[in-house]
Image: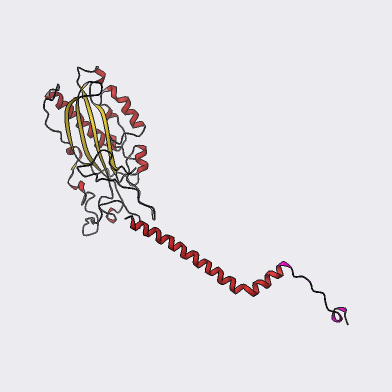
Amino acid sequence: MPDWMREPQPDRPLTRAERLRLGWAEHSGKLLGGLAAVVVLAFLAVLGIGGLGIYDHARDNGPLLPDRRGLPGQPRPTDADGNSISPWAATPAESFAAGADAIVAPPAKATGPFTVRQVTDALATVRQALVEARIDRTMVELGDPTPFLGLLAPDSRPKIRADFSAGGALNYATRVDRDAEPGLDATDRVRARGTVSYRATTDQDGIRVLEITTSFIWVYHFDLWQAQEYPPGAELVTVRDRVVWHLPHPDDVRPSSRGLWLEDAASTLVNADCAGINRGFLALTPEEPLRRRPTPGPTGDVYDPSWRPGDGEAC
């Protein structure tokens, strides 16, 4: 008989691979159950976090799905086919005049040292400056401030030209981002409403000036795709500004300083893209991504008579 049949064989230690196979065979059911439990708990945790995010969003009155700012609770008027009747419908701008017709100057009267003719000419120049700055396509669509600069006193032009180069002119002039998507609807005119007032005073250097203050709401229509799917006003960007213009008395300044000066300007923009604003250009704000908290809106209604320059700027 062979030796291996007559004598017991000595015990051989198991290898690591053999121990693993034996352990898996004995405990595989328990391990699979535990792994499944971990996966289920992780899935429930993700759902819980997402649910809390949606709850917080709803609690903060934020949109659960991408949306644009509009007039809350007011449906968009549509025709029988479900198309939007007008971009201005059900918005405050619905009753605004279009283009230059919105700029109405008060009657000219002799004021302080300024004659009726001087006041008349000054008001006409300011009106044209508003047209060139906020309405004319040369500025708005092409971004060219040359006609606007030509209306200002020669000595004031370098500072204003530098303002345009630095992207800081939105307080008194509108340049639409030509690469914006959606782009400005070139077939529609800007709508506006505002006031013009004037008085005789002196500036900080003691120079007699005719001070003209313009306060306007400018509303621009962007070509939003399927606008009927959004609240009223979703395709509109509103600019509310207050600009102070000075016309020095010709006897108090040198010839190159005679003419219109832009003394001060402030504005609030609603529904405008903050990245565009930082570059000095107007564009429609992009849609809010899912689960992102909405950016803060203006603290005061831009259409309200109690509005103050720069009040509630969101950017």
Magenta-colored segment: predominant secondary structure: loop
Residue 173 place in picture, x, y as percent: 28, 35
**In the image, what residue occupies the spot 35% across and 51% down?**
294
Left or right: 193 with respect to 181?
A: left
- Reply above or below: 136 against 33: above
Residue 178 in view of the camera: no
Taking the view exactly as shown, the residue that stands out farthest to the bottom is 1
Quadrant for residue 154, please give it.
top left
Magenta residue span: 1-16
Q: Is residue 29 left or right of residue 164?
A: right
Residue 10 in magenta stretch = yes
Q: Whole-percent x and y of residue 172? A: 27, 34
Q: Residue at x 20, y 34 (%)?
A: 214
Q: Which x, y percent locates residue 124?
A: 17, 29
Quadrant showing the N terminus: bottom right
Give me the residue at 65% from left, 75% from top.
26
Q: In what quadrant of the picture does the C terminus appear?
A: top left
Which of the 4 image quadrants contains residue 204? top left
Depicted 17 relative to depicted 9: above or below:
above
Frontmost residue, 8 versus 167 = 8
